Each structure stands twice: as structure tokens, then as C-alpha cells.
Image: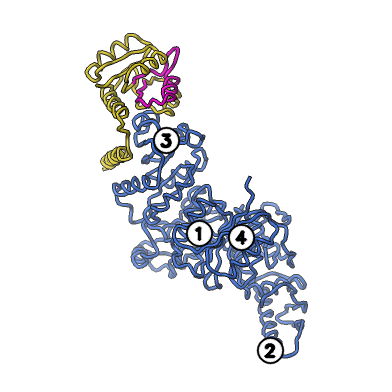
Chain colours: A blue, B yellow
């Protein structure tokens, strides 16, 4: 079994490259290989097809074609064979991360702002990708925080129709409503939206749950309400914001075990015209849900006599499933089939299948898909999807969690609903940061009727990290009586006051090691200074 | 000159087939089971085979397996009947040309004509090329589109 750890860096920052290379050599994590390259359209797919890496670091600093890049990452994440690849986004600064926040819901699991400690990022990446947990430093940990806050679960808008919109998230709630700010319509005051339907099988982004939500459209009788949208507003918004949207592309499903095909097909991939979903197995329980929801009008199936997944029996199962869950039967293109179309149609009792003896190639795929799309009726223009790089696409679903402990590196919290590993949650405690849910580094005990999670703090800049460190130290040595928003705000205010004094002290020629003791707004400030690492 | 081989253990059916298909093939050979059919294939240039799936001595599945093992890609049309679905699945894995439902044999002449033409082309080096199935695909798309409209 090949145990070599394979990393890839797409970018051109020599410092990051060197640190990554040094870490790979000295981390003691066994044999590692690290590939470095600049990004150009298609070269990520090339690498993943021929030498699939475990971790891919993508430096957003000098990448111009971000839309291509994101489409490529999503293409990889939709492929069953490559879903486990860990994507890490690297940003030059906090504002760049803000500008590119759509990466958060497009398949990236860790984030890094340059200027902070790279080794911490690499430790986290190695832990997630290789379960390598040997050298985590022991960070000061604030326990017994016992604060319930509304965390923001990183989610994405997918499409918008006449009366509804689709939202995808890793948060799967049993409620009938979702709370979030719909920044697409700034004039809309509504923050609560009714769930029309929910599915756990059909996400377009790499998330677990898809919600169909009602757009609160006003009737002519209540046009004054700020909580409702007017139909004309929605239509003119769609016209004005056409660059954010594309008509809903055709969903095409491919059952194929040949990984090279994904690479060949990518050459002809046109994300605005069709979406591709690769699978190997038709026996999956998720397939019926996927087919019923996504309604692919075109399905490719490759016969592989050497495998159960590619057998005639699997083809038979596929035709049975589509016949039972889809009103309009899709066209199945069956490649590598020694039998003729007529024989297979009769065998399966399925008339919309065409067979040929050759294996499917990128060129044949392109030819067939192109003529299919040409022959197809015009797509329903009332349904639009958000462009992958649309700034209004990402949003945070609000859901209450209980904070249990906090370090400068990780947070533990409990939540009343189960969450998938590596999903992203945003906190504001007392600074805004994102956490990637990971298997816990130490035992975390769940309370009754709740789930206890650990999240690695990711994509935090040094200034926010400094505030977070101070906050943690304050509450370790001098816990707050209560963790109300007012108490935390008071603590942060007093910390800021100390910071101002610290700045004055630094300017002074005398080196002062400890903060003076201050008492402000009823909050005790402890004189013990944080002794962790800092580049500031 | 296009030669047809019909394999079935029912003598009456073999005779009927000979009469029904006489104007579609230059010569029609018959065999009572797969084993006899293999001997005919060895001795004659056959362009298409019609074969029952369920037969004594050597059934349709064993027959096609053996034919393909000998690198013979002759088109083979199978009779299918109620209860023979698993055998239809098996023969498909080796390349079935078409299935005819017993006992009505609907579309028999059309299927045999296509089979003979295909076998003749294969014998004379005119293999199906991607363009063939692409035009077939276009026709199917057109059919689907018209059906929708």
C-alpha cells in the first residue's frame, strides 16, 4: 500500500513554498511528496487525475481566473473518487479572504491568512488529511464558558426561482423555519424563511442538506410590508443582477469507474450549460433521491465487465430506479456495451437507451452532449443559479450552540443537531472567526440531547488572534460572572483600553513586561501576560 | 450472399423459420442445439444466427460464450420467452444483437435483415464506427424530441 503523503501547492509565494517544503521534510510524518505549480485552467484537474494529492493548498494571491479555479474545485468535489481531497485556501490578508469568501462554500475546508503561523495551518491540515496529531502544542484553554450564542453555519444560495429559492448547508435542522440574513435583497427585512422542502441528497455545493425556501412575495394587498418582496422587485433584481446568475444548467450524471474520463471530459466542461456528477455505484441509497430531485435528462453509464458497479445488473438497477422515480425518463447512453441498442432496450424494457461498443471518451461525450443540448427544448429561464463566484451566494444560517471551551487554536461547543465533520461554522467570540469541525483532539463529553464538537479555528488574522488570546487569558484567570453579550463587550472594551496603554508603553524606552492591573466596567483584568508565540 | 443459421430444439419451428425467412437469406442452415450450431459455424460462412436461449445439450448462454471465445463476432439474435430474463442478461454480456419474443416473433423479418447486413459488414471488414451510433443517437434524440412535442 502506498503511504506517501502527497501535497500540492498552487501559487507562487516563495516563502510559503519554502515553509511547506521544510515542514514536509521535518514533520516526521513519514514519506511526503510536495508538488508546486502556478494555477492555469485545467492543471488542477490534471494533477488530481494522474497523481491525486491528499491536500491541495491554493494561494489566492496571484490567481486571476478564480471562477475557473472554483469550478475546477467543485468539479473535483462532485467526483466520488476525489471528495476526500482537502482543499486549503491561502489569502494575502483578511480583506482578500473577505472578498473571496465564496471559497468557504465551494469545497475548501481550511483557510490561512499570510502573516500568521504557517506551521499551525500545516499541523491542522496533516491532522485532517492524515490523522497526524502528534505535535499539537498545548494551548491555554478557557473552560466553563457556558455561553449560548447564535453561530453562523456557512451555507450557500444555489438558485432562485419565481416563488422560491434553494439554499444548501451542512446544518440539517428539524425546524420549519431558517434564520439568516438574505443579503441578496438588502431592502428585505425578513430574517426568517419558511422551509418548503428539504433534501439530504441533492446538494450542488459540497454540503449535506438542500433547502427549498419560500420567497416572501407580497400580494398587492400588503405592499407596504418590509418583510415581503414584490414580484416586480424580484424581476427587476434579476435583470439588474444578471451577472450574478446563470440559467439553471442541465444536470448530467455519469457512472464510470475510469478516472481518466473525468479529466478528458473536463476539456469540454461548460459549467454554465451543464453540471456533471460522477458516480461509480448505482446501488447507493442516495441515488434514487438524487435522480428524483435533480432529474438528469441525460445519463452516461459505462459497462465494465470486471466490476459489479459496471455490470449489466447495475445497468438494470439504474433503469428500474429511473423508471420508478422520474416522470420524464432520461436518455441513457451506455458505452462499452457489446450488445446492441435494440437488444439492450428489450432486455431492460427501456426504450430511451442507446448503446455502443466503444468506451466513452471525452470527445464522444462532448459530441453527444452537444447534440443533446441542441435538441433539448429551451431551459426554463425563470430558474437561475448563482454564479460560483457571486459575492451574494455565501450566507450564514443562524443556529444556537453552547460554547464549552476555547483556545487560540480550537473551540468546543455543543449543538442540538448532529453536524458533519469538516463543516464550517462562524463565531463571534469576541472576534469573528471560522472553525472547521474536526474529530476531537481530546475527549469531549456530550451532554444529554446534544452533540459536542471541536472546531479548528481557521483563517484568522494576527490582530484578531491577539484579541482572542487576551480574551482567553482573561477568562482563564478571571472568569466572568456571566457570559452575557454585555459582559463580553465590557471585557473587550477593557482589553482595548489596556491595548492602548500597551502601545504607549511600547513607545516608551523602558521595557515593561506586564500590563498594569485595571478595573473597568466591573470587569477584572488580570496582570498575567500571555506567553504564547506571536509575530507581532 | 448472406447466410443464416437457426438453432432450436423444436423441429417444427426450424422448418417454419426456413419457410418464413427464405426470401431474406441466400442459405438457411439449421441446428438442434448449441453444439451442432458450433459445428455449422465452423464449417460455413454464417452472417447471422437466430438462437433459442433454453435448449438441451448446449443452451444459448453456453453457445454465445463459446462463439465469442473463438473470436467470432457474428450477430446472434435470441428468442426470449417468459422466465428467461436472467439468461437474456447473461447473453447480453457477450454481445446479443437483438431479442425476439417467442412465440409471436414480432418484427422477425426486420431484425433478421438488420442482423444479416451487420454480420455481412463485420465479415467484410466494415466494423461499426462511432459515426454509426452517433447518427443512431441523433435519430433517437429526434424521436424523443418529437414525442415530447
Could you tell me which chain the residue with mark 1 belongs to? A
**Mark 1 and mark 4: span between their CA atoms?**
14 Å
Disc 2 target residue? A507
Residue B110 against residue A251 in the figure, above or below: above
Letter of the chain that mark 2 sits on in the rendering: A
Q: Is residue A423 something one can see in this rendering? A: no
| Discs 2/4, front | 2
- Range of residues picked out in magenta: B49-78
First of labels 1, 3 by sequence position:
1
Q: Tell me, yes or no, whether dots 2 and 1 are on the same chain.
A: yes
Residue under label 1: A106
Identify the mark nearer the N-term, 3 or 4.
3
Residue A299 on image: x %, y % = 40, 42
State the image coordinates of residue A126 (x, y, percent, origin top left): 65, 58
Q: Earlier in the sequence, mark 2 or mark 4?
A: 4
CA gap, disc 2 and disc 1:
44 Å
The spot of residue B110 in percent (x, y) is: 26, 25
Disc 3 chain ID:
A
Q: Marks 3 and 2, how far apart in space?
A: 76 Å
Q: CA distance from mark 2 to mark 4?
A: 38 Å
Kindly check if marks 1 and 4 are in contact, taking CB atoms under 8 A apart as contact. no
Find disc 4 in the rendering and name its residue.
A436
Query: Looking at the figure, which quarter contains the N terminus of chain A?
Result: top right
User: Is residue B69 rendered magenta in the image?
Assistant: yes
Query: Could you tell me if residue A193 is visible in this image?
Result: yes
Residue A389: x percent and y percent?
A: 45, 64
Q: Residue, x 44% and y 29% (percent of image)?
A: B93
Q: Which residue is mark 3?
A: A319
Mark closer to the chain start, 1 or 4: 1
Q: Which chain hosts label 4?
A: A
Determine contact: label 3, label 4, CB under 8 Å.
Answer: no
Q: Is residue B1 left or right of residue A513?
A: left
Amino acid at each position: 500500500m502506498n503511504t506517501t503523503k502527497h501535497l500540492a501547492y498552487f501559487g507562487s509565494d516563495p516563502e510559503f513554498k519554502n515553509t511547506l517544503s521544510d515542514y514536509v521534510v521535518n514533520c516526521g510524518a513519514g514519506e511526503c511528496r510536495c508538488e508546486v505549480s502556478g494555477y492555469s485552467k485545467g492543471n488542477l484537474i490534471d494533477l488530481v487525475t494522474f497523481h491525486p494529492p491528499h491536500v491541495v493548498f491554493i494561494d489566492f494571491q496571484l490567481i486571476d481566473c478564480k471562477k475557473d479555479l472554483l469550478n475546477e474545485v467543485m468539479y473535483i468535489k462532485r467526483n466520488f473518487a476525489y471528495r476526500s481531497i482537502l482543499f486549503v485556501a491561502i489569502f494575502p490578508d483578511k480583506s482578500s479572504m473577505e472578498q473571496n469568501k465564496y471559497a468557504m462554500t465551494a469545497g475548501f475546508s481550511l483557510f490561512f491568512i499570510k502573516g500568521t503561523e504557517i506551521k499551525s495551518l500545516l499541523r491542522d491540515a496533516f491532522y485532517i488529511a492524515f490523522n497526524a496529531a502528534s505535535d499539537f502544542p498545548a494551548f491555554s484553554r478557557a473552560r466553563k464558558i457556558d455561553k449560548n450564542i447564535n453561530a453562523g453555519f456557512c451555507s450557500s444560495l444555489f438558485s432562485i426561482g419565481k416563488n422560491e429559492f434553494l439554499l444548501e448547508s451542512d446544518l440539517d435542522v428539524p425546524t420549519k423555519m431558517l434564520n439568516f440574513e438574505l443579503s441578496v435583497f438588502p431592502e428585505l427585512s425578513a430574517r426568517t424563511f419558511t422551509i418548503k422542502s428539504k433534501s439530504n441528497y441533492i446538494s450542488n455545493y459540497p454540503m449535506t442538506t438542500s433547502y427549498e425556501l419560500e420567497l416572501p412575495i407580497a400580494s398587492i394587498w400588503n405592499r407596504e410590508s418590509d418583510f415581503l418582496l414584490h414580484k416586480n422587485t424580484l424581476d427587476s433584481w434579476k435583470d439588474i443582477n444578471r451577472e450574478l446568475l446563470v440559467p439553471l444548467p442541465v444536470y448530467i450524471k455519469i457512472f464510470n469507474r475510469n478516472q481518466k474520463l473525468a479529466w478528458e471530459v473536463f476539456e469540454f466542461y461548460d459549467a454554465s450549460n451543464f453540471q456533471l456528477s460522477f458516480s461509480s455505484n448505482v446501488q447507493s441509497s442516495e441515488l434514487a433521491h438524487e435522480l428524483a430531485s435533480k432529474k438528469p435528462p441525460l445519463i452516461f453509464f459505462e459497462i465494465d465487465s470486471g466490476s459489479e458497479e459496471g455490470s449489466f445488473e447495475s445497468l438494470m438497477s439504474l433503469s428500474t430506479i429511473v423508471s420508478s422515480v422520474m416522470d420524464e425518463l432520461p436518455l441513457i447512453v451506455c458505452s462499452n456495451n457489446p450488445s446492441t441498442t435494440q437488444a439492450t432496450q428489450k432486455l431492460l424494457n427501456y426504450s430511451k437507451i442507446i448503446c455502443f461498443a466503444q468506451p466513452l471518451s471525452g470527445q464522444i461525450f462532448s459530441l453527444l452532449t452537444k447534440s443533446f443540448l441542441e435538441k433539448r427544448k429551451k431551459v426554463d429561464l425563470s430558474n437561475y443559479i448563482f454564479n460560483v463566484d457571486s459575492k451574494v451566494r455565501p450566507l450564514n444560517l443562524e443556529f444556537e450552540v453552547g460554547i464549552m471551551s476555547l483556545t487560540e487554536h480550537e473551540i468546543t461547543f455543543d449543538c442540538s443537531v448532529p453536524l458533519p465533520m469538516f463543516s464550517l461554522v462562524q463565531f463571534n467570540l469576541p472576534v469573528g472567526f471560522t472553525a472547521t469541525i474536526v474529530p476531537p483532539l481530546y475527549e469531549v463529553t456530550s451532554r444529554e440531547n446534544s452533540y459536542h464538537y471541536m472546531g479548528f479555528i481557521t483563517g484568522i488574522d494576527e490582530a484578531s488572534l491577539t484579541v482572542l488570546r487576551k480574551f482567553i487569558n482573561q477568562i482563564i484567570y478571571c472568569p466572568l460572572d456571566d457570559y452575557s453579550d454585555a459582559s463580553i463587550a465590557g471585557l473587550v472594551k477593557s482589553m482595548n483600553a489596556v491595548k492602548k496603554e500597551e502601545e504607549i508603553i511600547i513607545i516608551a524606552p523602558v521595557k515593561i513586561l506586564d500590563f498594569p492591573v485595571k478595573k473597568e466596567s466591573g470587569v477584572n483584568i488580570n496582570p498575567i501576560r500571555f506567553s504564547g508565540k506571536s509575530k507581532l | 450472399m448472406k447466410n443464416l443459421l437457426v438453432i432450436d430444439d423444436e423441429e417444427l419451428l426450424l422448418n417454419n423459420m426456413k419457410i418464413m425467412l427464405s426470401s431474406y437469406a441466400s442459405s438457411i442452415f439449421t441446428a438442434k442445439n448449441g453444439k451442432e450450431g458450433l459445428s455449422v459455424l465452423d464449417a460455413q460462412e454464417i452472417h447471422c444466427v437466430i438462437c433459442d436461449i433454453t435448449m438441451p445439450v448446449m443452451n444459448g448462454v453456453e453457445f454465445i460464450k463459446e462463439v465469442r471465445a473463438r473470436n467470432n463476432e457474428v450477430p446472434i439474435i435470441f428468442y426470449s420467452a417468459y422466465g428467461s430474463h436472467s439468461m437474456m442478461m447473461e447473453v447480453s454480456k457477450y454481445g446479443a444483437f437483438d431479442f425476439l419474443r417467442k412465440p409471436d416473433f414480432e418484427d422477425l423479418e426486420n431484425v433478421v435483415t438488420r442482423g444479416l447486413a451487420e454480420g455481412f459488414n463485420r465479415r467484410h471488414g466494415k466494423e461499426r464506427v462511432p459515426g454509426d451510433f452517433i447518427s443512431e443517437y441523433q435519430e433517437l434524440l429526434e424521436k424523443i424530441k418529437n414525442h415530447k412535442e
